[in-house]
Amino acid sequence: MRVDPAGWPFIGAALALALVAALAAGGLAGAFFLGLGGFFLLFFRDPDRTPPRDPSAVVAPADGRVLVAGAPTGDTLPPGRWQQISIFLSPMDVHVNRMPVGGRVTKVRYHPGRFLPAYKAEAGDLNEYTEVWLDHDGEDVVLRQIVGILARRIVCRTREGAVVETGDRFGIMKFGSRMDVFVPETADIRVRVGDRAIGGVTVIAMLHGH
């Protein structure tokens, strides 16, 4: 099973503590840290995904439950006129983040903020996030990696000028978080609130050009 590189320090530390605890306090203490290592292994898992071939398809950037699908809900929106899809990631979901469409990365911006629970509506405005702008054949698509109450570090591995494909891995958020995707008003939203999304696979919207 592939594991995101950000997970190995957590997994290694848990296994080391399991060994030390087992030697110092017995098997029960060691089993606790061994179980913790198993949780980290599950959390940082990075399964292969096959995105749809249609270049107009916007795919989910992460696994999780759809919180918003339609009109934007926040106050601190990217400049422009948008529709919004928001996905909440529980600690049990795959947290590897994937590009929703192919194109060129035009902006990468970090915004400091708070650490409210990611499922709260105001989290999109107030929490810490990284914002990535993509130029897809002249249309902008914007995504935000938004941290939650447990996630305190965003890993964003893309850069301005990078050329990406739909479904490419580009980062991870640790221990519960949220992804917001902003698509043009002309896009056709394909998910509803409450739906489950699979990162890199589930089509959340279709672009129709200018």
Image (spheres, rainbow, N blue to C red):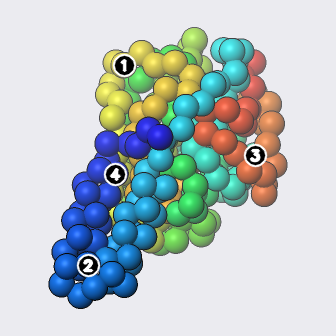
Could you classify mark 4 by the number of other residues whose Cα lies within 10 Å: few (under 14), some (14-19), or many (20 or more)? some
> Which residue was labeled with disc 4?
7
Q: Residue at x 59, y 69 (%)?
A: 120
Q: Which residue is mark 1?
A: 162
Between the C-alphas of marks 1 and 3, the distance is 28 Å
The tag earlier along the polypeptide, 1 or 3, is 3
Q: What residue is drawn where x is 64% and y is 53%?
A: 64
Give the numbered dot on residue 198: none
Q: Secondary structure at mark 2?
A: helix
Instruction: Report, in whole angstroms, how far the alpha carbon at label 4 lies from the one at label 3.
Output: 34 Å
Percent x, y of residue 199: 61, 39
Quadrant of the snapshot with the C terminus = top right
Q: CA distance from mark 4 to mark 1?
A: 24 Å
Instruction: Say whether disc 4 or disc 3 marks the residue closer to the N-terminus.
Output: 4
Q: In the rendering, at what x and y percent does residue 30 appear?
A: 31, 77
Q: Where is residue 207 shown, x and y percent of the image? A: 71, 22
Amino acid type of disc 3? Answer: Gly
Comparing 5 with 167, the one in front is 5
